Image (cartoon, coloured by chain):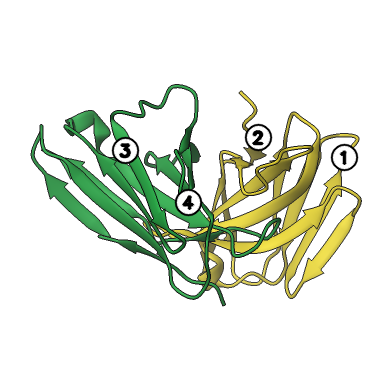
Chain colours: A yellow, B green
Amino acid sequence: SQQGEEDPQALSIQEGENATMNCSYKTSINNLQWYRQNSGRGLVHLILIRSNEREKHSGRLRVTLDTSKKSSSLLITASRAADTASYFCATALLYSSNTGKLIFGQGTTLQVKP
Amino acid sequence: GAVVSQHPSWVICKSGTSVKIECRSLDFQATTMFWYRQFPKQSLMLMATSNEGSKATYEQGVEKDKFLINHASLTLSTLTVTSAHPEDSSFYICSAQDRVGSPLHFGNGTRLTVT
């Protein structure tokens, strides 16, 4: 399977702490994206990092990409209870003509306790 | 921002009946939409790529006669689960791009329960 793997599968932290989630993938990619899913809802795009980028920031989010290790991490700083959700990484394959066809990781369920 | 609307949000049907799920791009045109299936506490599994004006491209292992996809306009794709069985019960989600290479915009999903 080309599907990526994420760890940890579940993470529980206190409000104010940082949360780090990791994603590994198997094939060469054009870009890697992170999405958030609240329970029973659709996914919301958080951030996209291209294969030639190593780090990207967006508000309290920091994403890194190491193409040599085929891995990425998502750091959420100063977490809030509202950050409680599942987080998925998704990869867009290199040379794919279908730029919307993403391979999703297994997801990390984050619980932020108030 | 780009909005994708999915309807219904939940549906209960009896075994043997068919169910249609709609996915609409509200403020942009989508030549391509995507349909996924998600089991509880699991990841999204891509079922098919819906192409406006042509046949959908199904992923390996997905029965095209079971899951009928129609993309008749640039703002609407439909997924019909035919002759539904309890094992078809799942969370179905659609997504679309508002331009090539952009991130995906997702609908809020449809919870299908087949009794």
Seen in the picture, residue A16 relative to A9 is either above or below; the reply is: below
Q: Are marks 2 and 1 on the same chain?
A: yes
**At 77% across and 49% down in the image, what residue appears?**
A31
Outermost residue on the front side: it is B53
Judge from the rendering whether residue A48 lies leftward or rightward of residue B83; answer left or right.
Answer: right
**At 11% across and 38% down in the image, what residue appears?**
B17
Judge from the rendering whether residue B66 lies leftward or rightward of residue B97; answer left or right.
Answer: left
Answer with the quarter of the image where residue A97 lies: top right
The span from disc 2 to disc 1 (Cα, nearest Å) is: 13 Å
Q: Are marks 2 and 1 in contact (CB under 8 Å)?
A: no
Give the residue type that dot 4 points to.
Answer: Glu
Mark 3 residue crowding within 10 angstroms, few (<14) / some (14–19) / many (20+): some
Give SS at disc 2.
loop
Residue named by callout 4? B52
Seen in the picture, residue A5 relative to B33 is either above or below; the reply is: above
The span from disc 2 to disc 4 (Cα, nearest Å) is: 29 Å
Query: Which quadrant: the N terminus of chain A?
Result: top right
Query: Where is residue A114 drawn, in percent x and y?
Result: 51, 72
Q: Are marks 4 and 1 in contact (CB under 8 Å)?
A: no
Residue named by callout 3? B68
The span from disc 2 to disc 3 (Cα, nearest Å) is: 28 Å
Q: Who comes first in sequence, dot 2 or dot 1? A: 2
Which marked residue is nearer to the observer: mark 3 or mark 4? 4
The one of A7 and B91 positioned closer to us in this rendering: B91
